[in-house]
Each structure stands twice: as C-alpha cells, then as structure tokens.
Image: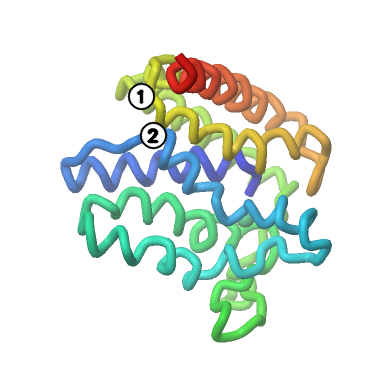
Amino acid sequence: MFAVGHMSLGYLLGKISAKILKIQINTPLILVLSIIPDIDIILELLVGNPVHRGPTHSLFFAFLIFIPFFLIFKTRVIPYFVALASHSVLADFFIGGEIQLLWPLTESEFSAAQFGFSMVQINDPINIALELILFIFAILVMLKAGDFLKFFRSNISNFLLIIPVITVLLPTFTSYPLPVPNLLAFPHLFYLIVFVISGLVALKKILL
Ligand SMILES: [Zn+2]
C-alpha cells in the first residue's frame, strides 16, 4: 500500500477500536504509527542496503515498541497498536509483495500469496480503488468525529505529523521508492498540505 492507504486504514481501525473501548484517540499519533514500518524507506537511503519491507515490517518490531506501553497504559494502547500492526498484517502482507513478518526468527519473506490468496500488486487497479475508498472514508469519519479540525488547532502532538511528511509523503513526490499513480497523487498531496500546515501551527506553539 501507499502512504495514503496505510494512514487511512490505520485511522479507521484505530477509531473503530477506540469506539469499542470507549476511549479517545490522538489522531496524529495514530497516523504516524500507521506508517512507522515504512521509515525503512529512509533507512535504506542511509544504510545503502535494501531493507524496505524488512525488520520494521515484522510482528517482533510491533510488539517490541508496544510492550512497555501495554504494561503502563493497558487496553488504552490497543487503537495505537492496531494502527501500527495494520500496516504489515492487513496491508503489506496482502498487497505489493512480501515482508519479513517473522524477523528475527527468520529472514524469509512472507505474503498472503503463499497461503492461497491472489497477490495484489501495488499498482493494481484493485489496490488503487481500495486506497481511494479508504481515503474518502477516513476523511468523512474525521470530519464527522471532529478530528479533522484538530489538525489546525494549536496542539503540540500535531508536530508529529512532520514524520510522515519527511519519511513517506515527500519521497513519493520524487517517485521514491516508486511513482504514485495519478489517482492517488491527490490524496497524497491532500495529506501533505494538511500535515505541513498542522506541523507549522504546532511549531509556532513550541517556539512562541
Ligand atoms: Zn510498508
């Protein structure tokens, strides 16, 4: 999946699990966690080795990050864990190729195709349609739940949105690691503009 699909899916699943648990969520944190495994796109540039869809896409990585938070915050962490885990388990495992899901137990790569599902390539019209639908649903839910306007309120946690801007949104506009299909370019640009404005509003609060 591209960034827009990961963030929209992570937000929707985080929101559903928060509703079940009757708790509030921090939307910027949910969005950031949903794309955290793809920080390996930037790591790849730094280390000079092909590490994308590697260890950061493993179950071990997700649990390693969350064990301390589960111990402290208990079930309130679930929406955030769901947002992070959805990246590998629900999205990349089914779409776009294989991932090192069971690293460090094995460096072998896995995908749903090995379990009888048909592999959906990232540029497949099915995936593009799915990401567009997830994007539209996520924005509608954000508007209805009042989460969208929070991007433009002075809240320090909105500064976290600089992470997806730098690691996944800006790189896609340089066609790195791969070109974004035209139909998904608008949602990417939309999130990029909203996050930059939101980050600047938060930065103003930090500096003033
Ligand atoms: Zn990924």
Cβ of mark 2 under 8 A from ligand 1 = no
Q: Which mark is residue 27?
A: 2
> What amino acid type is highlighted by mark number 2?
Thr
On the image, the x and y values in percent for residue 10 come to 45, 45
Q: Residue at x 50, y 28 (%)?
A: 136
Say whether marks 2 and 1 touch (CB < 8 Å): yes
Given the current orientation, which residue lies at the most extreme front position? 208
Q: Residue at x 18, y 47 (%)?
A: 21
Q: Residue at x 50, y 58 (%)?
A: 90
**Within 10 Å of the Cα at label 1, are there few (<14), some (14-19), or many (20+) other Cα atoms?**
some
From this view, report whether residue 207 is shown above or below residue 125.
Answer: above
> What amino acid type is highlighted by mark number 1?
Asp
Q: Place residue 152 in its image quadrant.
A: top left
Element at badge 1?
A: helix
Element at badge 2?
A: helix
Compared across the picture, whether 99 is left or right of 89 comes to right
> Which residue lies under the disc numbered 1?
147
On the image, the x and y values in percent for residue 65 come to 43, 62
Compared across the picture, whether 78 is left or right of 36 comes to left
**Within 10 Å of the Cα at label 2, are there few (<14), some (14-19), or many (20+) other Cα atoms?**
many
* Nearer to us in this view, 169 or 68: 68
